[in-house]
Image (cartoon, rainbow, N blue to C red):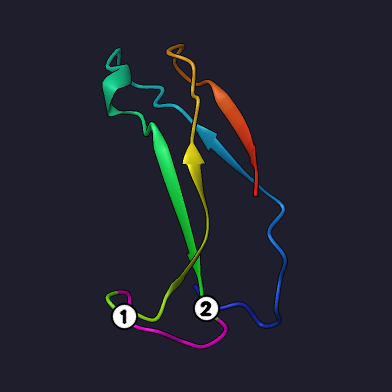
Amino acid sequence: MTLSAPEVIKEMKLTSRTNDEIPQWDPATYELYASTSALAWDSADWVKVSSGDVGLPNARGSVVTLAI
C-alpha cells in the first residue's frame, strides 16, 4: 500500500476469525513495519515500529484494539 502523504498510526484493530471454532489459527503476536520510501516486500530496509502480544479472546469475532 502506498499513502499519498505521511501518516501516524496510533492504533490497530484486529478481529478473530468468525467462521470456525479453531482459535489456534488467530494470531498471538504482531509486528508492524514501515518505511519512508517505496520498498519491495522482501527488502531488508523495512523498520520494525511496533510489536507485541495480540491478546485476542477465544470468542469468535472478538475485536482487540492495540495501541502502537
Q: CA distance from mark 2 to mark 1?
A: 10 Å
Tell me which corner region of the image, top left, top right, bottom left or bottom right, holds residue 23. top left
Which numbered circle lies on residue 30?
A: none
Q: Mark 1 sits on what residue?
A: 43
At label 1, counting other C-alpha atoms closer than 10 Å, the crowd grade (few under 14, some 14-19, many 20 or more) is: few
Task: Assign a secondary structure to mark 2.
Answer: loop
Tell me: residue 34, above or below residue 49. below
Tell me: residue 44, above or below residue 49. below
Q: Residue at x 38, y 31 (%)?
A: 28
Q: Mark 2 sits on what residue?
A: 35
Task: Assign a secondary structure to mark 1.
Answer: loop
Do callouts 2 and 1 mark residues in contact (Cβ within 8 Å)?
Answer: yes
Horizontal relation, residue 68 to residue 26: left or right:
right
Q: Nearer the viewer, residue 18 or 10?
A: 10
Instruction: Name which residue type carries label 1.
Output: Ser
Q: Which residues are magenta?
A: 36-41
Q: Residue at x 47, y 87 (%)?
A: 38
Tell me which corner region of the image, top left, top right, bottom left or bottom right, holds residue 66. top right
The answer to which of marks 2 and 1 sits earlier in the sequence is 2
Q: Residue at x 43, y 45 (%)?
A: 30
Q: Main secondary structure of the magenta part?
A: loop
